[in-house]
Image (tube, helix red, strand yellow):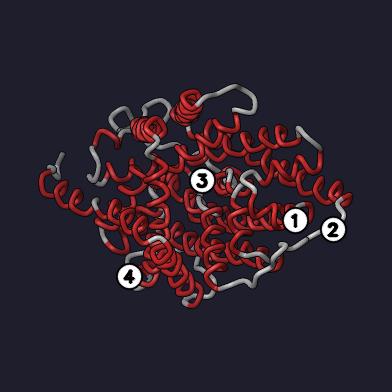
Amino acid sequence: MSSGQPPELRRAIRLPHATALVVGTIIGASIFVQPSEITAQVPSVSGILLVWLAAGALTLIGALACAELASTFPATGGVYVYLREAFGAPAGFLWGWAMLWSMHSGIIAAIAVVFARYAGYVLPLDETGTRLAAVGVILLLSGINYLGVRHGSGLQTIFTWGKLLAVILIVALGFALGGRVDQHFVGTAAASPVTLDGFLGGLVAGLFAFGGWHMVTYSAEETVEPRRTIPRALLVGTIVVTLAYVAMNATYMYVLPLDQVATSTRVAADLADRLLGVGGGSAMAGIVMFSTFGALTGIILAGPRVYLAMAQDGLLFRWFAAVHPRYRTPHRAIALQAVVASILVATGTFRVLFTRVVYTEWIFFGLMVLGIFRIRQRRDVRREYSIWGYPVLPALFVVCSFAVALHQVLRNPGETLSGLAIVLTGLPVYWLWRRYSDPAR
């Protein structure tokens, strides 16, 4: 690179790192909490396993669709780029707008708080201490990613392998020591039939537990051979997570009665207490901290690449389009994300924003996959990977994505519609920005 050229992002993410990013960003705290929400809505062992398999199958279809788009547009920004190419700049801007102010920054804040609360098993933390610990872990991991994508992706890979080993250990111990339990896969005391509404509610919860599969696409320009690496990482990573989730849930239901799984607020800790006696929950708290720390590493790595792409397109202040001359990272975008997420933690506003807006992510996913039909009609693009089962599987994913969003609206109309309104405030911001910003700036 000559001295007259601006610094570029460094290609350092290979297939093992990309696969670890897929697995590591999905497996966070949800598998240690979300099974209770699903079991409460689907009080059946077979129904619960079917929900997790269905959620994994839909996630896999979405990942394969994302893989085709990644092989077509191997550029920094991922979903932002795909929406922009399919439906124009406003659609891409809305995704980035929702990411920065609620969806992505909100999930960083939420997972950081989960990490800090489990740290309370080790350190005596009050509410203020918990928030300070959460902000501290955000700043720490932002600093590591600031220093280079190799540092961030390497740390992500280490923690992902650690999490998978922990899952294998939990499953092995569950079926080995759980044999001492009198009855296995015990249903609820007042068993009720699985309803369509309950199944859909459980499926929504399962899909949220699979959240983050798309984030590997954000760093395409830092990925070695992205047209090949990203599709492979998405395929392998999604299958690994699905197997891990089904195995973990089978372990919960093998050891604990469904009544307890359905009502527990810390199902993984209850499992550990049953297997190891009192104090087992503290050991599980360490595993949850390890898992959430690893998930945060990947999520913090991914987001700034979208803001970098937006700034390069003139949809965010150009100042955030800078790449660090030494570390070759989007350092200012990393700092922006860290500040927003820390503010959400400090004020506690992430709870309202994230819970109201997170379902809208599936509207964007539906639009993203719908965009494949439009992009395939263009003659100026080429792809090196095509989704299996086109057009049936993409169409099925689009229908299911919009069904997820509609189901959430019908269940909680006031909360979800206000969340959609928060996202749509990005439209007047976009038009004002386009009108008053200097395109040559």
Choose mark 3 or mark 2, whichever is in front. 2
Secondary structure state at the residue bearing disc 1: loop
Q: Position of residue 243 (x, y in %)?
A: 68, 57
Give the mark nearest the N terminus, 4 or 3: 3
Which numbered marker is on residue 183? 2
172 and 301: which is toward the camera? 172
Q: CA distance from mark 2 to mark 1?
A: 8 Å
Of the numbered discs in the image, which one, if any, rests on residue 342? none
Task: Tell which tag, 1 or 4, sits nearer the viewer.
Answer: 1
Q: Position of residue 323 (x, y in %)?
A: 35, 33
- Quadrant including the C terminus: top left
Instruction: Give yes or no for contact between labels 2 and 1 (Cβ–Cβ under 8 Å).
Output: yes
Q: Amino acid at mark 4?
A: Arg
Element under disc 4: loop
Instruction: Please give the label number shown on residue 378.
Output: 4
Between disc 2 and disc 1, whose residue precedes? 2
Number of numbered markers: 4
Residue at which label 3 appears:
224
Residue ID for mark 1: 257
Q: Amino acid at mark 1?
A: Pro
Mark 1 Cα shell of 10 Å, populated few (<14), some (14-19), many (≥20): some
Q: Residues within 10 Å of mark 3 (few under 14, many from 20)?
A: some
Residue shown at 58% from the left, 37% from the top: 294
- Res. 1 in view: no
Q: Is residue 367 left or right of residue 56?
A: left
